[in-house]
Image (tube, grey):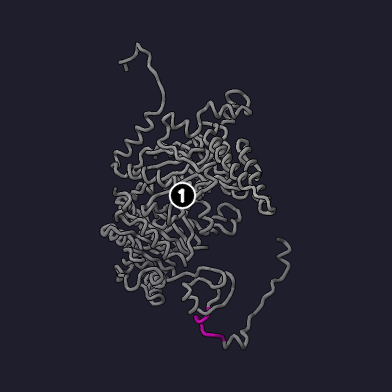
Amino acid sequence: MLKDIFTKKKKYASVPSDQAKHDVPEGIMTKCPKCKKIMLTKELDKNMRVCMNCDYHFPMNAKQRIESLMDEQSFEEFNQGMLSENPLGFPGYLEKLEKDREKTSLNEAVVTGKGTIGGHPAVVAVMDSSFRMGSMGSVVGEKITLAIEKAKADKVPFIIFTASGGARMQEGVLSLMQMAKTSSALKLFSEEQGLIISVMTHPTTGGVSASFASLGDYNFAEPGALIGFAGRRIIEQTIGEKLPEDFQTAEFLLKHGQLDAVIHRDDMKKTLENLLDMHQTGGDIEWLQD
Amino acid sequence: MAPRLEFEKPVIELQTKIAELKKFTQDSDMDLSAEIERLEDRLAKLQDDIYKNLKPWDRVQIARLADRPTTLDYIEHLFTDFFECHGDRAYGDDEAIVGGIAKFHGLPVTVIGHQRGKDTKENLVRNFGMPHPEGYRKALRLMKQADKFNRPIICFIDTKGAYPGRAAEERGQSEAIAKNLFEMAGLRVPVICIVIGEGGSGGALGLGVGNHLHMLENSTYSVISPEGAAALLWKDSSLAKKAAETMKITAPDLKELGIIDHMIKEVKGGAHHDVKLQASYMDETLKQSLKTLLKLSEEELVQQRYEKYKAIGKVSVEDQYIGVN
C-alpha cells in the first residue's frame, strides 16, 4: 500500500522488569502455546504432557512415549548405537548431529525396540522430533526397516509413532530413498498378514507422511497434530490462496478420509491394547466348537 | 398414542380404551376387571390377526419408520468392543456408512452397515443413510482389512439407495458400487448380510454380496422403490401400494423366491417395539451362519458365494436349442 510508505513503523525496545530478572529458572514452568496457561513442567509430564487446561498435546520425546505405552521393564531397544555418516559431505552436518546428540541424549531421531503393551508383544518405533526435527536420513530409514523385519521374523505387530519434518535434506537423495525402503519392508510384512499400526503425532509431514506413516492397517493421530505432505506456506504460495485454519490438522484429515480415528493420549494405551487383542490369533471360541 | 401406521389403527384404539377403563377402575369403586380382561383378550387376537397378515405395503411402512432400529442400535446389542474406523483413505469419511471391528461372542469380526439418522439433525450428518462413493470405498477398505486378518464380515443393509447427486457422480458412484460387487466376490472370509430396513437397489447391494443373506421380517429389498416403480411402469407414483405387491419386495416374498437364506422373525408389531429382543433373534441366526461358514475353506467360501449368485435368475431355452451351446 502506498500510504504504508509514509507511516513510520514504531519500534519498541523491551526492558526486562525487576520481576522478570528474578523469574523462575528455565524448564520449571511451561506455558501452553494454545491456551497460554502456565503450569508446572513436572505436573505436565505427569499428565503425559497434555495441557490440564485445554487438552493441548505437547510433543513427547521418545523416552516419555515408550514409558507411557509399554509395560514396565518390557522394552528392549534395537540398534541403539547406529550413527549417521555424512555421505554428501554436507558442510556442518556432523557437527549438527553431535549437538543434537548432546541435547537429546539420543543417537538418532528414532528409537526402535520390542516389548509388550498390556501383555501383547509388539515391535515399536518411536520418532523424536527433538532430534533434527525427526527428519529421516539413512539411520532412521535403516532402523525402521530393521524393526519391521524383526516384527516379520517374530510374527508380532509393528507399531510406529511418527513425528517428523520429512526427509533429511543433508543426506539428499539417500533420504528420499528411505521412503521406498521402509515402504517396501512394510509391503513384505503386510503380505504375511503382519499388523501395522501408525500413530501420527505432531508434526508428521513430507517424506514420512508420504511413506510409512500412511501405510498402517490402522492410521491414527493425536488431537491437533499437524499432518500433511507439503507445508502450508508452500501451498499458499503455489495456489495464491489463504488456507483454512484447521488445514492439515488431525481432525481435518479424519474428515477427509485419511485417518481411522483421532485418539486422545489418555486413551492411547487402552486403544492399542484392545486392537492388539482383537488381532490375536488362536484361542478357542466355545460356541463355534459344537 | 396416535396411530402412526394406518393398519395399526384398530389396535391403538383398543389399547386406548383399555387404558381408559383401567384408569376409571382406579378412580372409582366400580370393578371393571372382567370387562378389561375381555378386551385384553380381544386385543391379543386382533394383534395376532393384524401383525400376522401384514400386507406388503404395511411392511414397507414399518421398514421406513423413523425409529426403526439402525445398524448402530444392533451393533450395540449384538457385539462387544466395537471400534469404529473412519475414512476411505482417499477422499472423505462418509457417515452414511459405519464400519469397524468388534467381537461377536468373543470372535473378532468386521461389522459394516448403512447408517441413517432418526431425526432431521442426525439425518443431515448421515445423509439419510444414502452413501456417496467414499462410503462404499470405506466399506471396501474395511472388507479388505478383514480379509487380510481372516475376520468374518457382517453387513447390515439399510438404505433407500446410493445418493443420487452431482458430487456422487463426479466421484464415480457406479464404479464404487461395481468395485464392491467385484471385490466382495473374491473375499476369502465368511460374509453375512442382513437387511434390517430398506434394501434400496444397487446402493444396498454394494454391501450385499455375501455367503448368507438374511432379512428381517418387515424389511424390504428391491431393484427400485415402490414409488419409483409405479412412476416408471404406470406413470403414477401414487400406485406405490400396488407396486409394493407386484414387485415382490418383502422378506416373505424374497424367501419364497429363494433370494434370501433366512427370514428373521420380528418382535410383534415390528423391531422398534423391542430392540433388545430383536437383536436376540438376530444373534441366533448369526451364530448359526458363522458356525456353518467357518467350517468352509477359503476356496469353498468363494465358490459357495459364486454359486449362490450364479443360481439366481430365471431363463428358459427353446426346445430346438437344447443340447446346443
Q: Nearer the viewer, residue A286 or B277?
A: B277
From the image, tell me which residue sits under label 1.
B99
Horizontal and vertical percent position of residue B89: 46, 50
Residue stretch rendered in magenta on the structure: A23-29
Identified at 46% across, 63% down, the residue is A201
Judge from the rendering whether residue A17 lies leftward or rightward of residue B94; answer left or right: right
Q: Where residue B118 sits: x, y (%)?
A: 58, 47
- Main secondary structure along the magenta-highlighted residues: loop
Position of B120 relative to A34 (above/below): above
Residue toward you, A114 or B248 = B248
Residue type highlighted by circle 1: Gly
- Counting the numbered discs, the total is 1
Q: Would you say residue A216 is visible in this rendering? A: yes
Task: Identify whether A150 is placed above or below B139.
Answer: below
Residue A109 in the image: state x and y as whole percent.
Answer: 38, 68
Q: Classify mark 1: helix, strand or loop.
A: strand
- Quadrant in the picture for residue B255: top left
Magenta-colored stretch includes residue B160 = no
Q: Is residue A215 visible?
A: no
The quadrant of the rendering that contains the C terminus of chain B is: top left
Neighbourhood count class around disc 1 (C-alpha, 10 Å): few under 14, some 14–19, many 20 upward = many
Q: Where does the image place residue B101, in percent across and percent down from the top left?
A: 42, 52
Q: Is residue B142 above or below residue B170?
A: below
Most foreground residue, A164 or A13: A164
Q: Residue at the location (64% across, 80% down)?
A: A13
